[in-house]
Image (cartoon, rainbow, N blue to C red):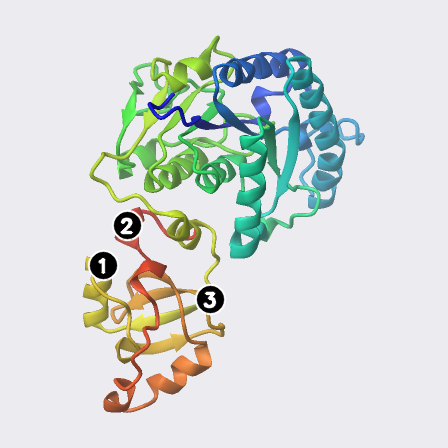
Amino acid sequence: MTQNNKKQRVVIKIGSSSLTSLHGEISRRKLERLVDEVVQLKDDGYEVLLVSSGAVAAGYRKLGCLTRPTSLPEKQAAASIGQGLLMEAYSELFLSHGYVASQILITRSDFSDEDRYNNARNTANVLLERGIVPIVNENDTITVDRLKFGDNDTLSAKVAGLVDANMLIILSDIDGLYDSDPRKNKEATLLEQVHEITPEIEEAAGDPGSSVGTGGMKSKIDAFKITMASGIPAFLGKSGTPNLLLDAVHKRAKGTYFQMKKDSINLNHKKQWIAFNSGPEGEMIVDNEAKKLIIDRKSDVLPKNIQAVKGKFKKGSVVRIFSSDGEEIALGVVKYSAEELKSIQSLELQKRESYKEAVVNIEDLVCHLEVSIPVSL
C-alpha cells in the first residue's frame, strides 16, 4: 500500500491456455486457483481488474466443433456460448469468497471514440472503487477482424492505462521473457528486468505457443511497450505458479518486470488515447521548422507550417503528421477540417500566416519519440 493509504490498482491478464483443459473446456481447477489468488490481493486491499480470455476456447466444443474454429461466424458463435459459461463460473467462485464480479465486453471502436473511452473508464472506476471485480474481455461475438484488438495482451495494456493501474500482470504459459526461445535453446537466459524494448528483444519474441490461445510473446512485447510508455510497471510470469500474484506485486516473483527508467516521459490519459486508441483519419505533411518544434516539443503546429493534407477528416479528428521527407513523426488532434486546411494551404505564405489558431496544440500531440513505438498500435 502507498503511504497515503490510496488503494493500489492491479490489472491481471490471463490467457486461454491458462484457463482451459487440454480438451478445450474450462478447467474448474485452474479457475479456482486463479480466483483464490485474486482474492488474496482483494483481502490485502488491492483493487483488481481481470482481463480474461477463454470464451471461444470454452464454447467451441459445445458448438459441435472438434477443434478451435477458424471461420469468423463459428468463432463468434463459440464466444457467445463460452462467455456465459466463463462468467457463470467466475461469478460463483468470487461470490463464494464474498466478492462480486461484473462483466465488461469491449470492442476496439469503444476505445477509438474518445467519449466511449471516457465512459468505459468511468464505469470501470465506479466498479473498482465499490470493491467489485470487473472481468473484461473483447466482445468476440460481434467484433469483425479489422476492428479487433488482435489479442487480450494488447487489450490488457490499454485497459491498464484506461483505469490508471499501478501494475499490469500478464499470466502466461512461460515464466518470463528470455533472451531466446527456451523451448528451442536450453541455454536461454531469463531477463528479470527490462527497461527498454530493444530490437534484440523484439527479435527474440516467438510465435504463439498454444493452439488454444491467440497471443504469443510478440503480442506481449507490444503490450509492454504500451505500459512502459504509459508509466505503468508490468510483470510477465507463469500461470499456476503458487502465490504468483501476491509475489508479483511485492516484486519477489520469478518472471520479468517491465518498467521505464524514472527519467522517461510518461503519457497522460489524453496522450495515451491519441497514441494507442484514436484511429487516425487523415495525414498532414509539415515543413522542417514544424518537424523540429514537434520533436523538441516546444510549440504548436501552425497553419503556415502545413505543406500538404491527405484524406477527409473533421475538426477534432486525429491525424498522422509526416515531415517533408516522408518520415512519420507524430499524431495530433486537429482544430481544422481537411477542407479548411487545404484552403489555407493553397494560399500564399503571407496570407497563411494571418491564421493564428494552431492546427494542433502541443498538449494534443504525441511525438514518436515520446512513445518509442508506432503510434495507434
Q: Which residue is mark 3?
A: 317
Residue at the limit of the structure toward the front, as seen here = 4
Secondary element under disc 2, as helix, strand or loop, is: helix
Residue 159: mark: none
Front residue of this view, candidates 242 and 177: 242
Residue at screen point 26% across, 71% down: 324
Q: Which residue is mark 1?
A: 297
Marks 2 and 1 in Cβ contact (< 8 Å): yes
Secondary element under disc 1, as helix, strand or loop, is: loop
**Residue 363: quarter of image:** bottom left
Would you call the spot at circle 3 few (<14 residues within 10 Å), some (14-19), or many (20 or more)?
many
Residue at screen point 40% across, 13% down: 247
- Earlier along the polypeptide chain: callout 3 or callout 2? 3
Looking at the rendered image, the quarter that the N terminus falls into is top left
Q: Is 50 on the left or on the right of 225, as rendered?
A: right
Residue at screen point 48% across, 15% down: 44
Q: Amino acid at mark 3?
A: Ser
Q: Position of residue 364 (x, y in %)?
A: 36, 60
- Earlier along the polypeptide chain: callout 2 or callout 1? 1
Q: Is 162 on the left or on the right of 27, as rendered?
A: left
Q: Which residue is mark 2?
A: 370
Front residue of this view, candidates 276 and 268: 268
Front residue of this view, candidates 354 and 111: 354
Q: Does 311 appear above or below 195?
A: below
